[in-house]
Amino acid sequence: MNLPLRRTRRALLALSLGALAACSDSAADKAADKAAGQAPAAASTLEAAKAAGTIRIGYANEAPLAFMDRKEAKVTGESVEIARVVLKRMGINEVQGVLTEFGSLIPGLQAKRFDIIAAGMYVTPERCGQVAFSNPTYGVGQAFLVKQGNPKNLHSYEDVVKNPDVKLGVVVGAIEAEYASKVKIPAGQMVVFPDAVSALSGVQAGRADAYAATDLTVNDLMGKTDGGSGLEKAEPFSDPQIDGKDVRGYGAYAFRPEDKAFADAFNAELAKFIGTDEHKKLVAPFGFTPQELPNGVTTAQLCAGQ
């Protein structure tokens, strides 16, 4: 081998070793930076939503709270429309709906399938241990949907307890199953449906003698059925008594516990909106009246079981 060729190969080898050293030094620097906490912090849910201009909300297709309006091809309802107003004031202009069964809302939130539950979910001490709630947007009592003529004479949860032949329909994961359990309705007398529309069909088909839901939900269902549905709202009706007091449910938005700062910011804007003329006008088409206002009831009180 001649001398010039050997010099050329040595030069190439030196260049290669230098490049490898540079790569190694760069990787080491990155690892050191990361170990020293110099890696850029991940954006919070609120910051990411503001940057993107959009956020995902989970809903369970229960009118008038949150449902898909087929005619308008968009998710709407009391909970969704209030969220749109509040989030827009926070700099988030678009809401994307993610449909799921009611019983899957909290697991879906925890799994980050969506970032807010906007389904009118009742605030309860049990749920407060799983999510961070906003303050409530409404308070409402209960109702039964039954066959015309109310053949089983059902006007309260207690009436179901008295008649072991009665089957009570409830939606999976909804508060009504908890109410039923607390007033001692046996599990064998409950029929679980995936959503409100399925429960209505179940009563029509005789799979259940009554469907238990909020007064607003039953009113909405009756408003959308024609005179030939064979169903009616059980009247009069008495709310269940639990721990010696009548039950009134309060619905709110739910966030992941680690997004409490997001929940607090949302709550601050929500407080400026609830009870205003703009709010009342927005929710009136969904059957909400001033009677459903939360009237100062807070999530802190509800989480404490007060």
Image (cartoon, helix red, strand yellow):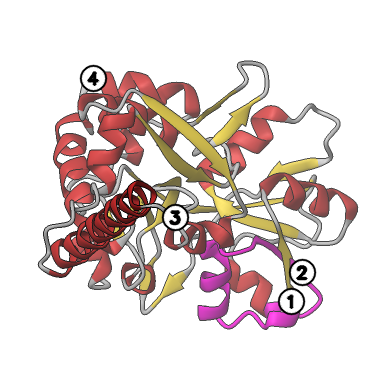
**Observer-nearest residue: 278 or 66?**
66
Q: In the rendered structure, which disc, 1 or 3, sits on the residue that comes first in sequence?
A: 3
| Dot 2 crowding, Cα within 10 Å, few <14, some 14–19, many 20+ | many
Q: In the rendered structure, which disc, 4 or 3, sits on the residue that comes first in sequence?
A: 3
Residue with the most extreme right position: 205
Identify the image quadrant of residue 268.
Answer: top left
Mark 4 residue type: Asp
* Residue 296, image x, y percentages: 17, 48
Give the extent of the magenta segment: 162-188
Mark 1 residue type: Gln
Quote the CA–CA distance across marks 4 and 2: 42 Å
What residue is pinned by disc 1? 189
**Which quadrant is the N terminus positioned in?**
bottom left
* Residue 156, image x, y percentages: 58, 64
**Which quadrant is the C terminus positioned in?**
bottom left
Left or right position of 194 against 229: left
Q: Residue at x 77, y 71 (%)?
A: 166
What residue is pinned by disc 3? 112
Quote the CA–CA distance across marks 2 and 1: 5 Å
**Observer-nearest residue: 237 or 190?**
190
Quote the CA–CA distance across marks 3 and 2: 36 Å
